[in-house]
Image (spheres, grey):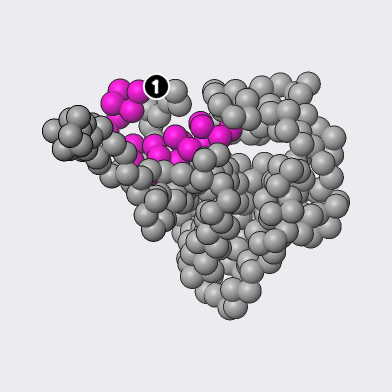
């Protein structure tokens, strides 16, 4: 296994993407990095954890940043053959492929409301609610509204969300997950205004502000909706469980909310 490397894909148009269909039938406009991210997510979440395939790709994917970690894997295409004297009569032929083995995504605000404690969510919809709930709204049309306050979130402050962290089973134990988290956090610290909405493009009214100073902008707060079984790993990377958010279920898997605050210093308002 060669030295791993990480690729970043910034928000992209993903029209025509479908999970579970051959790559060569998808539009050529869909970036390879995203296809590789979804290959990992399908392997881990759909095949291994039983998440319904149709629920894995969502409206947040086009507006998110995605990181994919690759390793070089040498594969034998034609095995070596020797004769009775031990001489090579057909040499081994092999090829090396950069194989995607892990991924993570970063979702900008605004977000859906915090999950309800004890709630059972499928495809982002609380069981018992209509399917036209907020989770299926186009994110750009979601209002910047006040949420319920929790332990680490006052219900108002914009936050970014890390999620869809996945590493293929055969490649766990190499600290690839931690490398992905570090890459994502280092990048947003270096680009702290990347997701801030443009006041000029959206207008103060849509942003729920009356002055430029009140316009929502990111100030270093990062959230994860962590599977309960991996909360200790997120804690190792600096995240703390938000007791006020409670516990809920997504696709039948128990989740908890966790937050981390990055020190990003002073930054300018994006006009």
Say left or right for 266 vs 244: left
Q: Quadrant of residue 25?
A: top left
- The percent position of residue 92, horizontal first and vertical second, equals 21, 37
Query: Quick one: which residue is furthest to the left in this view?
Result: 89
Q: Which residues are magenta?
A: 22-45
Vertical comparison of 7 with 99: above or below: below
Inspect the magenta stretch and tell me whether residue 36 lies in it.
yes
Say left or right for 82 vs 251: left
Say left or right for 165 vs 226: left
User: Which of the two residues, 176 or 110, is positioned nearer the viewer here?
Assistant: 176
Looking at the rendered structure, the secondary structure element under dot 1 is loop
- The percent position of residue 154, horizontal first and vertical second, equals 79, 59
Inspect the magenta stretch and tell me whether residue 53 lies in it.
no
Dominant SS in magenta: helix
Q: Residue tagged by mark 1?
A: 21
Res. 136 visible in picture = no
Query: Quick one: which residue is furthest to the bottom in this view?
Result: 266
Res. 183 visible in picture = yes
- The percent position of residue 88, horizontal first and vertical second, equals 16, 37
> At 25% from the left edge and 32% from the top edge, which residue is drawn?
79
Query: Quick one: which residue is furthest to the front in this view?
Result: 85
> At 74% from the left edge and 53% from the top edge, which residue is drawn?
232
Label 1: how many residues lie within 10 Å, few (<14), some (14-19) or many (20+)? few
């Amino acid at each position: 296994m060669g030295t791993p490397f990480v690729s970043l894909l910034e928000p992209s148009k993903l029209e025509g993407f479908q999970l579970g269909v051959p790559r060569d039938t998808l539009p050529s406009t869909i970036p390879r990095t995203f296809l590789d991210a979804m290959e990992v997510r399908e392997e881990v979440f759909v095949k291994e954890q039983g998440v319904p395939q149709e629920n894995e790709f969502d409206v947040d994917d086009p507006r998110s940043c995605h990181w994919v970690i690759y390793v070089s894997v040498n594969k034998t295409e034609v095995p070596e053959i020797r004769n009775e004297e031990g001489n090579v009569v057909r040499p081994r032929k092999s090829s090396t492929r950069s194989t995607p083995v892990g991924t993570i995504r970063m979702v900008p605000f605004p977000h859906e409301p915090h999950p309800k404690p004890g709630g059972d969510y499928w495809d982002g919809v609380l069981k018992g609610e209509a399917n036209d709930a907020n989770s299926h709204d186009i994110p750009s049309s979601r209002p910047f509204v006040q949420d319920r306050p929790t332990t680490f979130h006052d219900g108002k402050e914009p936050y970014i969300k890390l999620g869809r962290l996945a590493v293929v089973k055969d490649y766990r134990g190499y600290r690839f997950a931690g490398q992905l988290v570090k890459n994502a956090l280092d990048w947003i610290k270096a680009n702290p205004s990347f997701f801030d909405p443009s006041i000029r493009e959206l207008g103060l009214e849509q942003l729920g502000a009356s002055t430029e100073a009140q316009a929502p902008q990111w100030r270093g707060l990062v959230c994860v909706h962590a599977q309960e079984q991996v909360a200790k790993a997120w804690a190792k990377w600096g995240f703390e469980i938000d007791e006020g958010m409670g516990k809920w279920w997504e696709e039948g898997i128990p989740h908890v909310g966790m937050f981390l605050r990055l020190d990003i210093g002073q930054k300018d308002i994006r006009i």
